[in-house]
Image: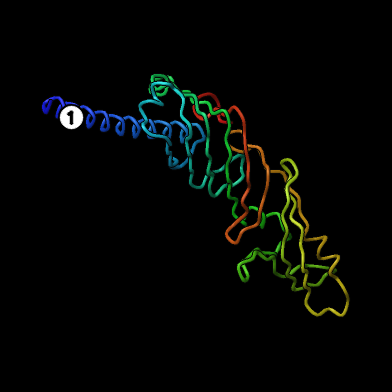
Amino acid sequence: MRKFLVVLVFLLILLAVADRGLHYAAQSEIAKRVGAQYEMSSEPEVSIGGFPFLTQAVGGTYSEISIVTGAMVANDVQLERVDVTARNVHAPLSALMSEPSAVAESADARVMLPYSELQQRLPEGIVIETEDGEPRMSGDLSMGGFSRPVSAALEISAEGDTVTVTPTDVRVGDTGTDLGAQVAQRLTVSFQIPRLPFDLRITGIEALPNGVQVSAEAQDVQLVGGQAQ
């Protein structure tokens, strides 16, 4: 009996080591493939959820895979970070290591855009800075041949793939006339966000102190294999 227990413990240790080894190899392979597919300057961080890994690998379906990128460019738009959680990912281990293909039934994500992407669409001389933890537009705005110091808080909204920045709490330097409405009109901008990675669709947007956070989701996502989505 004692010998049997020793052998059993030894086999369990081997299985655990094999589980972690294959787990790491699969994560590295997905990171390499996604990085190449989207021409990233560095490979993303990939984490395959669920334990043990071997049972998922044998079945070819993974309950959850997390992919976190660094800065990347998507259709000429700078993205600071893309944090994707993919669920019910179908990726047979044999295919993943040879002809890679990984398709998620669904995915949700948080995409961070730097304020520089908004700022370049504002009138010349206007910058976005954080004041008391809140983003605020400020600078010298050319109006009627004169430069006026202005500032405003901002609200951001999204409809489909169109993002609109609307100024609030508009302040204009002492001019003797009420230019608030004109300034608000000049500082209101709309622009289209191009197709996001993994064919993500925008569901929400929020202005944070460190950038614009876009919430997005997708169905039937080709994480690995095929063309960049």
From the viewer's perspective, tell me whether residue 170 is left or right of residue 109.
right
Residue 157 in picture, x, y percent from top left = 73, 51
For label 1, the residue is: 10
Residue 130 found in image quarter: bottom right
Residue furthest left as drawn: 3
Extreme-right residue of the structure:
177
Does residue 177 appear left or right of residue 56 in this picture? Answer: right
Pick the quarter of the image with the N terminus: top left
Residue positioned 45% across, 41% down in the render = 44
Residue at 78% in and 57% down: 188
Secondary structure under tag 1 reads helix
Q: Which of 92 and 15 is in front in this view?
A: 15
Q: Where is residue 174 in the image (x, y as percent from the top left)?
A: 80, 80
- Residue appearing at x 66%, y 58% in the figure: 119
Is 155 left or right of 9, judged from the image as shown? right
Of residues 16 and 171, the one nearer the viewer is 16
Asked where in the image residue 196 lies, by quadrant, the reply is top right
Task: Give the colouring mode of the picture.
Answer: rainbow
Q: Where is residue 65 in the image (x, y as percent from the top left)?
A: 47, 35
Where does residue 88 sit, x and y in percent of width and height?
52, 29
Which amino acid does the dot numbered 1 rest on?
Answer: Phe
Rendered image quadrant of residue 116: bottom right
Query: Is 104 drawn above or below residue 165 in the view shown?
Result: above
Quadrant position of the C terminus in the picture: top right
| On screen, residue 123 above or below 88 | below
Counting every numbered tag in the picture gives 1
